[in-house]
Amino acid sequence: MDMQLNGKTALVFGAGGGLGGAIARSLASEGVRVAVADIDEGAATKTAEGIVSAGGKALAIGWDAETFDGWHGYDTDFSFRAHLAGWRVGVVLDLAIVHAS
């Protein structure tokens, strides 16, 4: 399916596995550069490495969307890394599960 996103950049939260990982891989197969974000940075890295191994473009970042500290700083770190890679985010998908306490 051509989603007409070729050449765009997507930031996918919760992409370390499961549905988020599947969506990240699907986007990458359409030519989308994928920023793989997950609370488990190791899982995000594994997803990103799989995308790159398949010929896609991806970078991974550990991102805890559940806490303020997770947002403060990580957004700057991600923005800096994406800027260095020459990426401008055009699509954001949030598949992270945030638990209310």
Image (tube, rainbow, N blue to C red):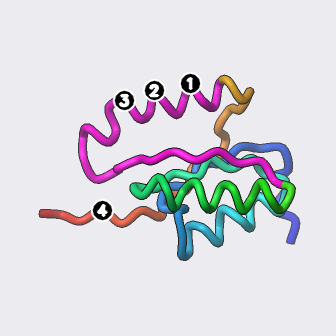
CB atoms at circles 3 and 1 under 8 Å apart?
no
Distance in Å between CA atoms under marks 4 and 3: 19 Å
Q: Is residue 50 magenta?
A: no
Type of residue at label 1?
Phe
Horizontal side, residue 16 vs residue 49: left or right: left
Q: Residue at x 60, y 67 (%)?
A: 21
Structural crowding at the residue carrying mark 1, measured as other residues with C-alpha within 10 Å and reported as few (<14), some (14–19) or many (≥20): few
Type of residue at label 4?
Val
- Residue 64 location in percent, x, y? 35, 50
In this view, the mark in front (4 or 2): 2
Distance in Å between CA atoms under marks 2 and 1: 6 Å
**Magenta residues?**
56-83
CB atoms at circles 3 and 2 under 8 Å apart?
yes
Distance in Å between CA atoms under marks 3 and 1: 11 Å
CB atoms at circles 2 and 1 under 8 Å apart?
yes
In this view, the mark in front (4 or 1): 1
Distance in Å between CA atoms under marks 3 and 2: 5 Å
